[in-house]
Image: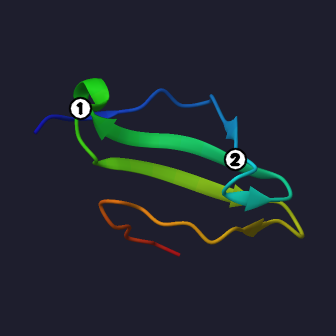
Amino acid sequence: MNIVRATTGKSKRGPAEYFTGTVWLDDLAATAGNTSAVRMVRVTFEPGARTAWHTHPHGQTLHI
């Protein structure tokens, strides 16, 4: 597996099906070519924003 640093400075708005309010997603690292389930994302919540219940098919590790 080859881990590469993702392009920084390209925040994306969190999708409404997973979040309420304004949430920003920043890709930090992913496997080359995104051929694997390995991905690292920084999620930033603006005041009042919340995560909606959802699942991750390969699991999830949170660093808070």
Residue 53 lies, with reference to residue 46, above or below; the image says below
For label 2, the crowd category at 10 Å Cα-Cα, with few meaning under 14, some 14 to 19 and many 20 or more, is: some
For label 1, the crowd category at 10 Å Cα-Cα, with few meaning under 14, some 14 to 19 and many 20 or more, is: few
Q: Which color scheme did the rendering employ for the protein? A: rainbow
Where disc 2 sits, the SS reads: loop
Q: How many marks?
A: 2
Residue 36 in the image: x percent, y percent?
23, 40
C-alpha span from label 1 to label 2? 22 Å
Residue 40 lies, with reference to residue 8, above or below; the image says below
Q: Horizontally, is 20 left or right of 5 in the view? A: right
- Residue extending farthest to the left is 1
Name the foreground residue: 23 vs 37: 37
Residue 29 lies, with reference to residue 34, above or below; the image says below
Residue type at mark 2 is Gly
Residue 22 in the image: x percent, y percent?
83, 53
Residue type at mark 1 is Thr
Where disc 1 sits, the SS reads: loop
Residue for point 45% across, 72% down: 63
Residue for point 73% across, 59% down: 19
Q: Horizontally, is 33 left or right of 45 in the view? A: left
Could you tell me if the residues under marks 1 and 2 are in contact, i.e. CB atoms within 8 Å? no
Mark 1 lies on residue: 35
- Give whichever of discs 1 and 2 has the lower sequence position: 2
Q: Horizontally, is 52 left or right of 20 in the view? A: left
- Residue extending farthest to the bottom is 64
Q: Which mark is residue 49?
A: none
Mark 2 lies on residue: 14
Which quadrant holds the N terminus? top left
Q: Horizontally, is 33 left or right of 50 in the view? A: left
Residue 52 in the image: x percent, y percent?
69, 68
Q: Quadrant of residue 30?
A: top left
